[in-house]
Image (cartoon, grey):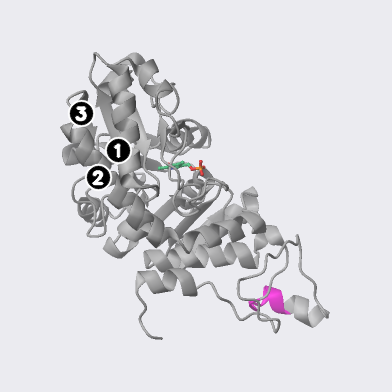
Amino acid sequence: MVNQSFETKIVHQSLKKTNHIRSKTTPIFQTSAFTFNSLEELEGFYDGDASYLYTRTGNPNTDELGQMVASLEGAPSGVATSSGLSAILAGVLSVASAGDHIVAAEDIYGGTHHLLKQELKNLGIETTFVNFADEAAIRHAIRDNTKLLYSETVTNPFLRVERIDKLVQLGEEYKLYTMVDNTFATPYLLNPYLEGIHIVAHSATKYLGGHSDVTAGVVVGCEELMSKARQKVVNLGSNLSSFEAWLTCRGIKTMALRMERQSANAKQLAESLYRNSYVKKVYYPTDLSSRGNGAIVTIELADTCDIHRFFSSLGWVKIVPTLAGVETTVSYPLGTSHRALSLEEQQNIGINQQVVRISIGIEDADDIIKQFDKAIQASV
Ligand SMILES: *Cc1c(COP(=O)(O)O)cnc(C)c1O
């Protein structure tokens, strides 16, 4: 096969020649099960024919989504799931079971933190959380029963960029699996599987879908691990619906265009915020990838700014507790994602009442900059 570039693959790989009707896009297989003409045919399914039986165990739309993301990440196999969190769960359970131990970065997504700290602990899988910027702390946390090192390529809300090479090196040294959540960077900006990470998870709810109209997840890796992850999804019932898989595949086709524009807009907004004397801190990575630095900018407003007046002066920029849509939105970590932390934990990671996370959209960059200037001015 001719080697295609990312931008070409993203639009063409999903075309399937599965039926004689030749629809331009993949139809939605809105069916809970599939029919068989004979017992031989049914037997063929169990013998590994490329056929379908029952949607929870496999559906052409969810398979297409898994394959699309795997291909964009450069991985052999991918599994679509009902949410980002269930993709992470399937990935973790493909390598860890009761009695095993995980070492995870302390600044990961709140939902993942809870999943590891509470739900998996209750099932006998224990996690130690450490500062992954501190290599000695990771080494110190590794035990005889440690199976997995877990982190995110870019963290929320302060956008710490993980040292993937270090993580891969530690994994090799201690013979551990490595897994990262690549949601914020997307496969457009980073491909951690190609750098040696074993398992890569995505909340497709964010940039893959890109339009804030689906909740979905995808986990990718080698055939062996993904076959285990697929079994977990089937057995735990955390499969994605065919319609949501279809919507996500549709969203993915424009991801390169969206990310290119959103990253460029974010760069311009970050530069303008750096120059604004009422902005105390700007958190924005500087060399994430050759294609851009992502589309999230987090700021800390000066102590003299009234945060309530800032939020109520944002005009068309809405307050939303999510990110990655085509619209520019803001979220308030103290009031939503990091609400459950103690005051001390919030202070340790830098969350306070002046911190605002901005998810930059595809609008005109000057309009975005003007709207934030206006809101900051109003808050002074
Ligand atoms: C949103 C998010 C998740 C969870 O995804 P859901 O689709 O809401 O389950 C996990 N990781 C990161 C980095 C996220 O932003």
Task: Give the percent coordinates (x, y) of residue 70.
Answer: 44, 65
Q: Nearer the viewer, residue 306 or 155?
A: 306
- SS for callout 2: helix
**Would you say residue 154 is visible in this rendering?**
no
- SS for callout 3: strand
Residue 312's label in the rendered image is none
In the image, residue 160 sits, relative to residue 262, either above or below, namely above
**In the image, is residue 338 part of the stretch drawn in magenta?**
no
Q: Nearer the viewer, mark 1 or mark 2?
A: 1
At x 50%, y 46%, the residue is 84
On whether ligand 1 comes within 8 Å of the CB at mark 3, the answer is no
Give the mark nearer the N terminus: 1 vs 2: 2
- SS for callout 1: helix
Task: Give the percent coordinates (x, y) of residue 296.
Answer: 33, 42
Q: Residue flagged by tag 1: what amino acid is it?
A: Ile
Residue under numbered circle 3: 281
The answer to whether 45 appears left or right of 226 in the picture is: right
Give the mark nearer the N terminus: 3 vs 2: 2
* Other residues around mark 2 within 10 Å, as few (<14) / some (14–19) / many (≥20): some
**Would you say residue 253 is visible in this rendering?**
yes
In the image, residue 224 sits, relative to residue 124, either above or below, namely below
Residue under numbered circle 2: 268
Q: Quadrant of the C terminus?
A: top left
Give the Cα distance between marks 1 and 3: 17 Å
Residue under numbered circle 1: 369
Task: Give the percent coordinates (x, y) of residue 351.
Answer: 31, 23
Please say if the residues under marks 1 and 2 sit with CB atoms less than 8 Å apart.
yes
- The picture quadrant where one finds residue 40 is bottom right
* Other residues around mark 3 within 10 Å, as few (<14) / some (14–19) / many (≥20): some
Q: Residue flagged by tag 2: what amino acid is it?
A: Gln
Q: Nearer the viewer, mark 3 or mark 2?
A: 2
Q: Which residues are magenta?
A: 44-50
